[in-house]
Image: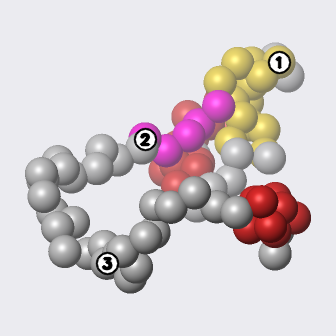
Amino acid sequence: MQQFNVHEAKSNLSKLLDMALEGEEVIIARHGTPIATLTPVRRKHAKRVLGAGRGSVTILSKDWDKPMTDDEVDAFWAGR
């Protein structure tokens, strides 16, 4: 985290923007009091296409949805 006063921020805006894009927290202060944080804008994801994942999932067993036995449940919750 680095803090810059308003005058420094105005003089070094390009540098501060690069720092924010690299993931560094940049705080702008007025008279030593933090007033703003520079953060990069999140890019919007591409529009989703219905059916784009078709065929990407394979079910290996016909009984994949059968209820688990008590031993299987215990092993699941125990992380085994």
Upstream in sequence: badge 3 or badge 2:
2
Label 1 amino acid? Thr
Asked if residue 73 shows in the view, the reply is yes
User: Where 34 falls versus 8 (above or below)?
Assistant: above
From the viewer's perspective, tell me whether residue 47 is left or right of residue 8. left
Label 2 amino acid? Val
Horizontal and vertical percent for residue 73?
A: 75, 60
Q: What residue lies at 68% left-to-right and 53% top-to-bottom?
A: 24
Q: What residue lies at 77% left-to-right and 22% top-to-bottom?
A: 34
Asked if residue 18 shows in the view, the reply is no
Q: Which residues are magenta?
A: 37-41
- Please check the rendered image and state whether residue 10 is part of the magenta-colored stretch, yes or no: no
User: Where 3 falls versus 63 (above or below)?
Assistant: above
Horizontal and vertical percent for residue 27?
A: 71, 34
Q: Nearer the viewer, residue 17 or 73?
A: 73
Upstream in sequence: badge 1 or badge 3:
1
| Residue wearing tag 3 | 58
Q: Residues within 10 Å of mark 3 (few under 14, many from 20)?
A: few
From the viewer's perspective, tell me whether residue 36 is left or right of residue 73. left
Q: Residues within 10 Å of mark 1 (few under 14, many from 20)?
A: few
| Residue wearing tag 1 | 33
Q: Mark 1–mark 3 contact, CB under 8 Å?
A: no
**Residue 75 position by quadrant:** bottom right
Label placed on residue 41: 2
- Badge 3 element: loop
